[in-house]
Structure formats: C-alpha cells, structure tokens
Image (cartoon, grey):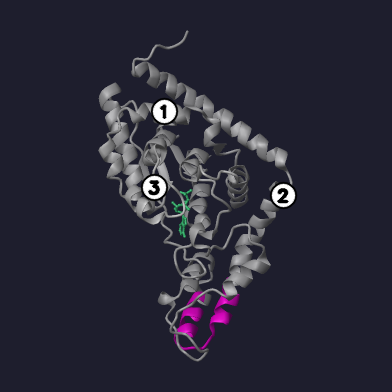
Amino acid sequence: MERVFSGMRPTGKLHLGHLAGALTNWVKLQDSYDCYYSIVDWHAMMSDYEDPSMMRQNCTEVLLDWLASGIDPEKSCVFVQSHVHEHAELALALAMVTPLGWLFRNPIYKEQLRNIENRDIQNYAFLGYPVLMAADILLYKATIVPVGEDQDAHLELSREIARRFNHFFGENRLPEPQMLLTPTPKVPGTDGRKMSKSYNNSLLISEDSGSMWEKLRTMVTDPARIKRTDPGEPDKCPVWDIQKVFNNDQQELLEIAEGCRTAGIGCIDCKKKLNGHVDRVMAPILEKRRKYENSPELLSDILNEGAKRARKVARETMLELREAMGLLIES
Ligand code: ADP
C-alpha cells in the first residue's frame, strides 16, 4: 500500500478551514493508503521558541480535533513528531545535501520574513523548515502528501532534496513525494478573509453550537447588501462560500442564491439555514470530541502507540541511510 504523510503544527485549536481544507480528505485517505499523520511540534517550535508555554496543550487540542473529525488511530498512525527522534536525525542528514541557495530562495520563507512581525524568525532552524519537512516525509518513504496549495514550494523542495540525496547516496533510495492537492477552495473566516488563526476570524471545530451561531450571525456578507431590501450577489459573499461547503441540499442552495439576488430573503434567513447545516455536520464531531476530552489516558495511549509504530519504520529507514552515507554502524 502506498504511504501518505501529512502534518499540522500544534498552534492551537483547529478551525473549519482545517476541517474542510484538509481533515475531511485525510479521513477519506485512511481507507486506501497507509497513512501517517503527525503533530509536528518541532516545526511549531522553529517560530514559537520564545514562548512554547502552550505547546503541550496545543498538541492535545490538535489530537482532539483530529480524532473528532474522524482520524482513526486504528487505521492511521497518529503521533507527535518529537516523539520519533529520527525526524531530527534525518533532517540533519538531509542538511548535508541542501544548498543554502535553495533555502534562501524559498518563496514561502521570503513571504514569512516579510509578514511575520510579532516573532523573531531570523534563526537557523526556521530557514531549514523545508529540510525538516522533507525529513518528515522521506523518513516513511511516503509518496503522497495531501497539502494545500500554499505548501507547493515546500513539497517541490522535498523532491529536490530527495533527488540530490539519491545523487550522492544511491539511486532510488528515497522516493520523490507527490503533492495531493485538496480540492476544497479557501474557506473564509467571519471577516471575509481566509479563515486563519492569525486573523482571529475562525469558526472552531470545538465551537459549541451557541457560539457558532453567534459568529455566523455577525459574519460579514456581500457589502452591497446594507438594507434588507438591497439585492446581493452570492459570489461576493463569504457566507455563501461556507454554504457551499456545508449545505448539501442543492435545491435549497438554488433558492438561497435566487433569494439573495432578488432580496427575497435576508442575510439572517440565509445564515439560519447555514447554521442548521453546520450544526448537523458538527454535532457528532463535537460529541466525539467531548468523549475524548474526558479520556486523557486514552489520548496518551493513542500517541504512545502511534510513536511506537512510526519509530519502527523510522529506525529501519535511518539504518539504511546511515549505511548508505558511509557512517560506522554500531554493532
Ligand atoms: P500548519 O501551520 O499546521 O500547516 P495551516 O493553518 O497552514 O497549518 O493549515 C494546514 C492546512 O489546512 C493547509 O495546508 C490547508 O490545506 C488547510 N487550511 C487551513 N486554513 C484553511 C482555509 N481557511 N481554507 C481551506 N483550507 C485551509
């Protein structure tokens, strides 16, 4: 079975963008692939080292959101990156064959240097983010990596690093991973920008139904609809984008679009309908999350078991690579 690897950084509770843009797809992949899903805490540490006080709590939140969304530890290997030391070791090995120019030219790095203001990311580790990401994937010889379009440049670097490693240490030793683009478009947040933790505009997976409605109720809509009698344009409305993700009733969708364009319905009517669908989808997820929240021992068991499983593969790969690189193997 082909192997899938993907990860998320433990930076807090996950939102509906993560659910629709990644997790729903991850859940589907579990039935056809050997899936490795990692909470990549070293990646979070690269930028958040100044204040890692929430790191542990955040790992738990991510795990809870994953399990609630349907990631099944019986099917997938679910683990914390730092529990498997070989991630750090392989990152060091791959660093040998990664030219500095590739890292300095990385467009994601350049963009982050421009945009991240509240943290000091002028460190050696953060520059090497794509090297650790390559290690994450190549450690399991995963060939399929489900990620959003924003990760395109990083995955290309993973392939280039694998290729260069193979050039020095043996053809086809590391398979070049392919990106599996998740088809869902960007999910907007309550202010109409991309839903993101850093914009404080998120609808959380763990949101209870009361606060979900409060956020939906006050969410921005087509700015042209100021009064109830003003007609609107769904394609300019972020609420409509969320309707398309959660509302599976095609007839109702047509009626909402028509009602919006003719001012036949108001924004609140549209939002009430959306809230019903979000509630339907999220209620079982929330219930599952509550169950796991009350079983901390089960959560540790899942992570211990996942680390054990991951470590087995990781150790095999590293033994092979250490030999290939000409290191003295301890007997
Ligand atoms: P990380 O830092 O862990 O990579 P991100 O917040 O960048 O976390 O999100 C991880 C993945 O979740 C992204 O690559 C993307 O596929 C998906 N995602 C995040 N936010 C959204 C969104 N608003 N709409 C759609 N997909 C999203």
Q: Start and end of the magenta stretch?
A: 253-274
Disc nearer the start of the sequence (1/3) = 1
Residue that label 2 marks: 291
Could you tell me what secondary structure mostly forms the magenta stretch? helix
The answer to whether residue 135 is seen in the rendering is yes
Residue that label 1 marks: 90
Amino acid type assigned to the residue bearing label 2 in the image: Lys
The answer to whether residue 170 is seen in the rendering is no
The spot of residue 61 in percent (x, y) is: 61, 48
Asked if residue 306 is among those painted magenta in the image, a careful observer would answer no
Q: Residue at x 59, y 68 (%)?
A: 277
Quarter holding the N terminus is: top left
Q: Residue at x 30, y 29 (%)?
A: 97
Q: Tell me which corner region of the image, top left, top right, bottom left or bottom right, holds residue 234.
A: bottom left
Amino acid type assigned to the residue bearing label 1 in the image: Leu
Residue that label 3 marks: 180
Q: Is residue 190 left or right of residue 157?
A: right
Mark 1 and mark 3: Cα distance apart in space:
23 Å
Mark 2 residue element: helix
Residues 284 and 128: in front is 128
The spot of residue 68 in percent (x, y) is: 62, 51
Return the mark for residue 75: none
